[in-house]
Amino acid sequence: MKGIYPVEPRSRKKVGKGNSQPRVYYNAKDIAFLSHEPLIETFRKLRIFHVKLKKAREKKDKEKEFRVRINKPRYTLHQIVKERYPTRQDALRDISDSLNLLFLFEKLPKLTQFHPSLISISRRLCVEFLNLVVATQAVRKAFISIKGFYVQAEIDGIPVVWIMPHASVTHTPTDVDYRILATCLEFDATLIGLYRINNLVYPPKLAVRVEHDPNGYYCGQKESLFEVAIDEQVSQAISKQIEVQNVKKLFKNKRFFLMREVPREVICLIIRSCGGEYDPTIDYQVVDRPMTDMKLTRYYVQPQWVFDCLNAGRLLPTQDYLPGCSLPPHLSPFIGSSGTDELLDTAVMSLSNRGGLVGVAPGFGDGASIYRPPEADYLAGLVSLAEIRGARVQAQSEGTIESQSEVDNDLLDDSSTKEENDLKTNVQTKERSKLKKVSKGMLCT
């Protein structure tokens, strides 16, 4: 906590006075610095407290045990956090590890060696942090992996990335020192206190729409936020601000229905952070199982559609995310820039390495523009698989129609020439018969 770590001496025999056994060594000035820490005196009082409590338990003196428990020494880590992180920006740059630990231990069952009260505190702090992210609409990226859900939020202009584990049965290992983890968790719980920014009320006024529903929490604001004027000369900052505003309003006036097999916590976080609100009517229903009863008034999509829309910054076509369909590739938004162009270039290069799809446009010489295959538009989110397949089917149908029309024209030409030939032969035979009759009459006369 104080930033003091063991050191490796140059000569273990010289420092250990001939003894080369493995030991942990610290600098003498670091030990002198720790001796002035006020927590040292509190730890001594805690050691005395545990001795008195043990004696009261052995004597089975309930009254004395009760008095000892009431007078337990208390301490806080606020001063250590302030010394290690003088400003809020410094704390935000190092808050990712704390969030990972909190979200990990709030998934643990309470029947473990870990103290149940710390698990409850972890759950409360996670809910408070998610409410902060929803209230400020700070979610920018999200990604699904086997470890969990990677989520990136922008708080005070600083990107914060953390992992939300999957909601599955966890088996706690027995060879872990939970005392050290409890100390780290206590420090991280003290570090996460961001509600003093953005005029948010702390502790948050939580409200649940449905009883015993942990996904319906929300928090209010003291005052309305004012828009900050942006300098018109900074075009890059303006474009970035426009993209952020578009992401904040991505799911505005959209209504979702989440099935029970869908990871509700992370999906609710993304939807609410992008402008989604509670409404009884439904536009999109997020499912992860085959559906038997489907309604025509709503879209049925798989959970990946929500993540891909957030990363793309726009509403993607739903044809590729229908239940039972093979999903498109889920590209990570944490590779390079947040824009889609860089992801597109990476995808197109991978396609070119595999099959050589990129080349010079047909019909042009050297130095012509690069050929853009249909897969590039699909990976950029401009078209869907259904549109590509529909275009191919339409092109094939048009080709067959043209070929049929050509065949019909050929048949018509053949039939017309045949009729003309028949007419000519008939006329010729009639003229010959007339000539024969005339010649016979002349001979008779």
Image: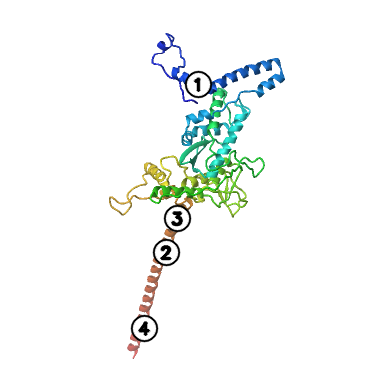
**Picture colour scheme:** rainbow
List the residue tagged with mark 1. Answer: 36
Mark 3 touches mark 2? (CB < 8 Å): no
Quadrant for the C terminus in the image: bottom left
Residue sticking out furthest to the left = 366
Whether residue 343 sits left or right of residue 107 in the image: it is left
Mark 4 touches mark 3? (CB < 8 Å): no
**Separation of marks 3 and 2 at Cα, in angstroms:** 21 Å
Question: Disc 4 marks which amino acid?
Answer: Lys
Query: Which numbered disc flags the more N-terminal residue, 2 or 1?
Result: 1
Residue 176 visible here? no
Relative image position of residue 225 (x, y in whole percent): 52, 47
**Separation of marks 4 and 2 at Cα, in angstroms:** 43 Å
Query: Which numbered disc flags the more N-terminal residue, 3 or 2?
Result: 3
What is the secondary structure assignment of the residue under circle 4? helix
Relative image position of residue 27 (x, y in whole percent): 44, 18
Question: Disc 1 marks which amino acid?
Answer: His
Marks 2 and 1: which is nearer the front?
1
Give the number of the disc on residue 434.
4
Question: Disc 3 marks which amino acid?
Answer: Ala
List the residue tagged with mark 3. Answer: 391
Marks 1 and 4: which is nearer the front?
1
Q: Which is nearer the eye, 387 or 160? A: 160
Give the number of the disc on residue 405.
2
Query: Which numbered disc flags the more N-terminal residue, 4 or 3?
Result: 3
Query: Which numbered disc flags the more N-terminal residue, 4 or 2?
Result: 2
